[in-house]
Image (tube, helix red, strand yellow):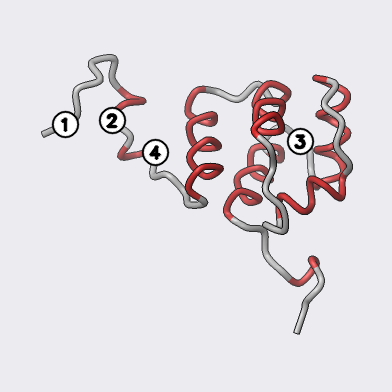
Amino acid sequence: MVTSGKNKPYCELGKVLDALARERDVRGPYKIADYLKEVVGYRLSGQGVSKYMYGMSTPKREFIEAFAEAFELTLRERVELAWVYAYNSRLDLADSWYLSTSDRTPPP
């Protein structure tokens, strides 16, 4: 049985994209697509963004780069987005020693 996108939750990448966009008052895939076009000139339909958010399609790296640039993501946000894009799971940033120290030596 196939369900419509409205009944299916966002995939992990979709959850991160949605949260990052909402923090900047941009809500929903169509608004994200409009924002990317307006701010950085990246053209993608709202339906395309929706497919990324529901896990029906995998975005190209250029989309992730455009999203990070358009929404002016911090280093932490970029790391979180890159991690979920690559591994389809959330990164626990509290345990990310490499973001909290300039030493780059792992903790014991």
Mark 4, Cα crowd under 10 Å, few <14 / some 14-19 / many 20+, is: some
Q: Amino acid under label 3?
A: Asp
Q: CA distance from mark 2 to mark 1?
A: 7 Å
Residue 97: give its label. 2
- Frontmost of labels 3 and 1 is 1
Q: CA distance from mark 4 to mark 2?
A: 8 Å
Q: Which residue is mark 1?
A: 107
**Mark closest to the chain's N terminus, 3 or 1:** 3
The x, y position of residue 86, in whole percent, is 51, 42
The x, y position of residue 74, in whole percent, is 55, 23
Q: Amino acid under label 4?
A: Leu
Q: Amino acid under label 2?
A: Trp
- Frontmost of labels 3 and 2 is 2
Q: Is residue 69 left or right of residue 89?
A: right
The residue depicted at 71 percent of the width and 33 percent of the height is 63
Q: Which residue is mark 4?
A: 93
Where's the C terminus, which quadrant? top left
